[in-house]
Amino acid sequence: MLGMNPDSKTVVISPHPDDAVLSCWDVLTRPDTRRVVTVFSGIPDSNARLSAWDRLTGASDPAARASERREEDRRALAIADCTPTHLDFLGSTHRTDALDTAALRAAIRRAVADADVMWIPAAIGGHRDHIAARDAALDVRGSRTCFLYADLPYAARFGWPVGHPNLDVKGWLTAQATGIPGNSLISEEYRTTLLSDSKWASKIAALKEYRSQFAALRAAAENGFPTGPEWAYEVFWPIQLKSPAIDPLLDGEGRVVPSPRSTR
């Protein structure tokens, strides 16, 4: 099976709690995958304001909700025998300062240090946290084998995985995946995984562990989420970059250490 080697260590990069389960369940259930790096899972300050999404999902305390989402993530991933590494970056709904992209790269670099393979969100739909997680992971990929996975439910907006007969959903998905600056897919043909009945059932069980988010996800996703036939599919691309990825030497605070100049 493409991307699976029982002797390798595979890590899935998840922008938020629930993204890896939504989009990458087949990979999470493979024997070489045991860990998910959940990037934007920081706990807001006690005086943080409720975001619009917090209000929609019935939260009364942003910090308590963030802690709750971490616990949901642990329970959901345990169904696939995976554990999350929760990074302390705040999501865009709670950030008040610009995202420190150097610190983000450094944190992901440390979190995937023992990985041979990375599965990275393609940022279909353009969510800024997904874009930031994708770009940081690609920057520090080193020589690892990498795959982009299509982000659900965003990728199913126009039908999934084929779409409406009068819409070029394939072109829409591919244009976003191939539009990453400086990158090139091995093939513009995305690969489709159809989950077995048992895997689909376990994915639905895992999704229901995200209790604070499930009602909003179901309303936003439509198309019979998560039991409609479209939701048994997952899509990904094997990728390579045109030029070597950035994998800088960093100091203890995530700052790039300048390379020494050669002398004669």
Image (tube, rainbow, N blue to C red):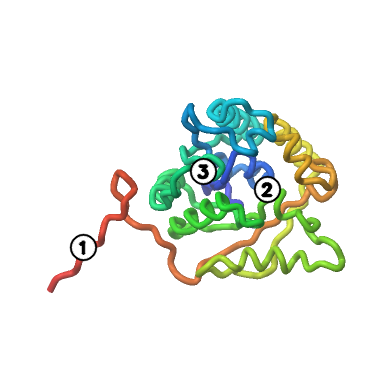
Task: Give the foreground label among 2 and 3.
Answer: 3
- Asked if the residues shown at circle 1 and circle 2 are in contact, with their CB atoms under 8 angstroms apart, the answer is no
Q: Residues within 10 Å of mark 3 (few under 14, many from 20)?
A: many
Of the numbered discs 1 and 2, the one sitting upstream in the chain is 2
Q: Position of residue 13 (x, y in %)?
A: 55, 47
Q: Position of residue 66 (x, y in %)?
A: 56, 31
| Position above or below: 166 against 20 | below
Q: Residues within 10 Å of mark 2 (few under 14, many from 20)?
A: many
> Which residue is at a point 49% across and 52% down the rendered structure image?
116
| Position above or below: 57 against 175 | above
Amino acid residing under circle 2: Ser
**Mark 1 = which residue?**
260
**Mark 3 = which residue?**
39
Give the SS element for disc 2.
Answer: helix
Of the numbered discs 1 and 3, the one sitting upstream in the chain is 3
Amino acid residing under circle 3: Val
**Can residue 1 be seen?**
no
Q: Quadrant of the N terminus?
A: bottom right
> Which residue is at a point 66% across and 41% down the rendered structure image?
21
**Mark 2 = which residue?**
23
Residue at the far bottom: name it: 264
Count of numbered circles in the view: 3
Of the numbered discs 2 and 3, the one sitting upstream in the chain is 2
Quadrant assignment, res 256:
bottom left
- Distance from label 1 to label 2 (Cα)? 42 Å
